[in-house]
Image (cartoon, rainbow, N blue to C red):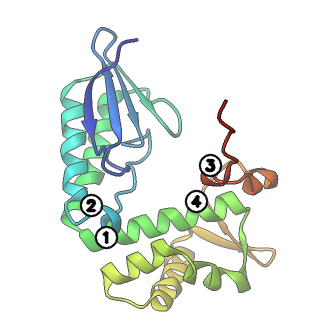
Amino acid sequence: MKPTGKWSAPPGTHPGHLALWQPEERLLVVGDALSDYDVGWVNLALDGPDAAATALASLKRMADLAPRMLLPSHGPIPADPGAAFVTALRRARRLVDDPDGAVWYGARRIFAFALMIRGGIPTHEVEPYLHARAWLTDAARLLGLTPEALAAELIAMMLRTGAVILRDGRLHAAAEHTPVEAETLRVPYPRAWPTPEPH
């Protein structure tokens, strides 16, 4: 496959990420830009206030290609690329129109994923865990809140909406997901990998 037609800053990524287009097969590798059920997280704290508009513009450019097949980084391959774009464009437009809502949306997603990855977090550890997260501090700054106030409201909101549940003394993500094996969490980040000796 010869990929052509690259777009920087697809939605849900940071500047410099790419989507790849294979025109003969009308195959579009969208990465984190969208999935069959969502759009990518737009980080306004790191990427600036125009990040959501850039993401929306990227989605529109990709939709205009009318791809036959989408290959996302997460979730199933969308059965109907056109319908996936309609949903993604609607959600991306909401992120542009409501910057505070975009920040809350990102905070809910990150926290839910953390709960999924960790198999839940003991209730007495949840707020200290959140207070130590850089993304929560960034979100609080954008919303004009203290990190403590944001953490408390985030937990309360997600419990109220049923996005998280209390079970066996732990807070869990309510969405269906495949548990992550515990040893996976002990794998070091690439920056901690040993540097090979030159030959």
Measured as percent of width and height from the top left, residue 126 is found at 65, 80
What SS does tag 3 mark?
helix
First-in-chain label (2 vs 4): 2
Q: Residue at x 43, y 40 (%)?
A: 35
Q: Amino acid at mark 1?
A: Gly
Assess whether mark 1 and mark 2 are in contact (beta carbons under 8 angstroms).
yes
- Report which residue position mark 4 lands on: 113
**Mark pair 2, 1: CA separation:** 7 Å
Answer with left or right where residue 61 lies relative to residue 116. Answer: left
| Residue at the spot of label 3 | 190
Label 2 to label 4, Cα distance in Å?
Answer: 19 Å
Q: What amino acid is labelled 4 in the image? A: Phe
User: CA gap, disc 1 to disc 4?
Assistant: 18 Å
Element at badge 2?
helix
Look at the image and tell me in which quarter the N terminus lies. Answer: top left
Give the residue type at disc 3: Pro
Which residue in the protein does label 2 denote? 95
Residue 72 occupies quadrant: top left
- On the image, numbered disc 1 is attached to which residue? 101
User: The residue tagged with tag 4: helix, strand or loop?
Assistant: helix
